[in-house]
Amino acid sequence: MRTALIAAVVVGFAIAHAEELKWPSDEARALGEQATELHKQAQREKDDKKYQEAHALYQKYLAKYHDLADGDVSYFDAELLFHLQRYEEAAKMYERVITVAPTGKHASEAAYADVVSTKNAAHQPNEAGGKPPCPDMKPCQIPPDIQRLAAAFDRYVAVVPGNKERPTMEYRRARIYYEYQHLAEPAPMFAHIFAVYPDHELATYSANLELDCLAILKRYDQLRALVERIKKSPAMKDATTQQQVREIDAGLKKRGK
């Protein structure tokens, strides 16, 4: 999990090289360097007032000038806001970085931080109370803040082509739709995880949840095909999965499917 400490370290490194940035004009350079210098002072002195002042200068810069090629100014401001635990605002700035420079030097880190910030800003009563969000097990509305979290996962998957975090991000995205009983959406997501990351610890969970989705949706042809894939997969030999497969297999045969 990304922490404020990690954010501060990243910001400190990035701002240390702010003088190397290609500012669009001398006037822009003056404002940009004023903001980054104040930001560095705030870090050194742990001064929240200076953080606020630096944030105001970043916003002034972004209102007056286009961001730099890699979205540097937005990224510095996002990191500042993350440090201040203003997560909803930070998420918007990280998203801006991804929009400005989806292949830029900050894109992967911004995509990850976008997810963490959005999650921190979201209200997730099912986590807090241990109760499912849809008590009657029928599709229910996904709250706006959880929709924003799903969108943040989408951005991460689009921006970060492959790393050790990606299977987890894909799984957590699918789980949002699963938990709110929107089962048509996560079924192919779980299928992708099972197919692409068969040795990952989440592959078994994904296969089980895809079985569940297809069974509830009564997509028996797809369910039969998945059962056969699981039977042949050397990674799917755990007792729970095999028992579930046997039960589904028996049920399909009983139905003549």
Image (cartoon, rainbow, N blue to C red):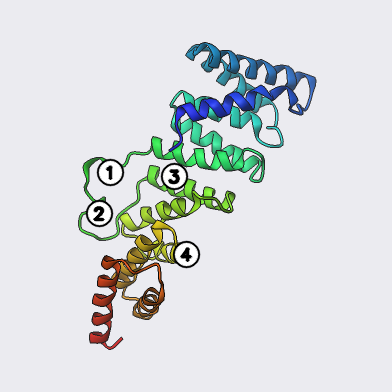
Q: Determine contact: label 1, label 2, CB under 8 Å.
A: no
Mark drawn on residue 118: none
The Cα atoms of the two marked residues, 1 and 3, are separated by: 17 Å
Mark drawn on residue 134: 2
* Residue that numbered label 3 is attached to: 148
Viewer-proximal residue among 113 and 135: 113
The Cα atoms of the two marked residues, 2 and 3, are separated by: 19 Å
Viewer-proximal residue among 252 and 99: 252
Q: Earlier in the sequence, mark 1 or mark 4?
A: 1
Q: Is residue 19 left or right of residue 190?
A: right
The Cα atoms of the two marked residues, 3 and 4, are separated by: 22 Å
Q: Earlier in the sequence, mark 2 or mark 3?
A: 2
Amino acid carrying label 4: it is His
Q: Earlier in the sequence, mark 2 or mark 4?
A: 2
Q: Determine contact: label 1, label 3, CB under 8 Å.
A: no
Residue 190: where, in percent of width, then height?
41, 63
Please determine whether, in this image, residue 216 is positioned above or below residue 175: below
Q: Going 47% across and 49% down the picture, which residue do you hit?
A: 153
Viewer-proximal residue among 234 and 42: 234
Q: Going 69% across and 18% down the picture, which residue do you hit?
A: 33
Q: Residue furthest bottom?
A: 256
Q: Secondary structure at mark 1?
A: helix
* Residue that numbered label 1 is attached to: 127
Q: Is residue 85 left or right of residue 246?
A: right
